[in-house]
Image (cartoon, rainbow, N blue to C red):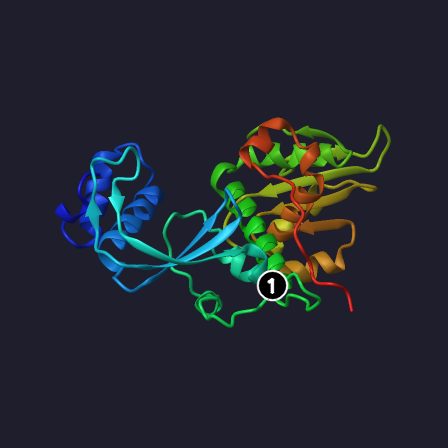
Amino acid sequence: MGDLSCINANRDAFKEKYTQVYPDAKKGNIATGAGMLYRFCYEMQIGDYVVFPSKSNREVNIGVVEGGYVYDSTQVEYVQTRKVKWLKHLPRMVFSQGALYEIESAMSLFSVKNYADEYLGALDKDFKKNYSSDSEDESVGATADDIIESTKDFILKELSRQLKGYDLESFVADLLRAMGYRTTVSPHGGDSGIDITAYKDELPPRILVQVKSQDGDIKETTIQSVKGAMREGDYGLFVTLSNYTKNAQKYLDNTPIIRGINGTELVELILKYYEDLSEKYRKMIPLKQVYIPVPKEE
């Protein structure tokens, strides 16, 4: 990107320059990358505080900006620089779980908002807050919920982005297989309205599955098409990335032989059976199993 001070002091100019330097960058990466560089050059001010979580020694370093933006071409990697005076180097355990979670953003430069007071308070000479003591960290529950919700949002977004129409049908068939069902995907363009046929084993009952990747909520008439294709003894399953209208949900409640799964419930099943999904779909939705702290039960 060169000397950032040579670029006009507005985000559009930074985006234009970023696009020239990285012509293959995705739209989202352009906005994020250009925005961070603009913020580093023009929005960051002398006197602002800096929080830097170091992974090498697991310390949280807090400092204050002492200099303006400088382009230093002699540096091997980080040529965009600002002078910082480091004030404190603290172990991570003295901060709440919520505060730690906020500074672990995927972005290189961003504003600390929710827990800014906690980091500023750490500069006080009498700061003795220690979350490794007997007092329970009240931010743990909210942090765990945030991680879980962001994971669910990620899965649903990736499904919506990468799996449309027939592709979503194949994915649902693979998920059912991971759950222990034998599945057959119907030929494309069939007029039966049934996308997948599933059996728990070689014997009945037969489960007829319809899959919809549309964004809008599913109406009652759409679900009724599944009912029309069912024979006596069959069960029906309707899968959507969105949700169901009130009338559609009422119809499902009154028709126990048809089960409706919405986007949220689909994500729950994906998380439960993720390890048994085909490698193709695990690469499409890359997840890593981790342990997260949760509040102690009363």
Relative to 217, 201 lies left or right: right
39 lies above or below 158: below
Q: Where on the picture, by quarter, is residue 87? A: bottom left
Quadrant the N terminus occupies: top left
User: In the rendering, at what x and y percent does residue 262 appear?
Assistant: 63, 52
Q: Nearer the viewer, residue 34 or 235?
A: 34
User: In the rendering, at what x and y percent does residue 109 appear?
Assistant: 36, 51
120 lies above or below 278: below
User: In the rendering, at what x and y percent does residue 213 appear?
Assistant: 54, 44
Instruction: Determine whether the residue tagged by mark 1 lies in a helix, strand or loop.
Output: helix
Q: Nearer the viewer, residue 234 or 51?
A: 51
Residue matched to label 1: 142
Q: Residue at x 62, y 63 (%)?
A: 131
Q: Estimate how packed mark 1 is, as few (under 14), some (14 to 19) or many (20 or more) residues with alpha carbons within 10 Å.
A: some
**For the residue marked with disc 1, what is the amino acid?**
Ala
User: In the rendering, at what x and y percent does residue 72 appear?
Assistant: 21, 41
Q: Which residue is drawn at 59% across and 57% down?
A: 93
Relative to 39, 188 lies left or right: right
Q: Which of 89 and 146 is in front in this view?
A: 89
Relative to 13, 39 lies left or right: right
Q: Where on the picture, by quarter, is residue 226? A: top right
Quadrant the C terminus occupies: bottom right
- Examine the rendering and report whether any part of residue 246 can be seen: no
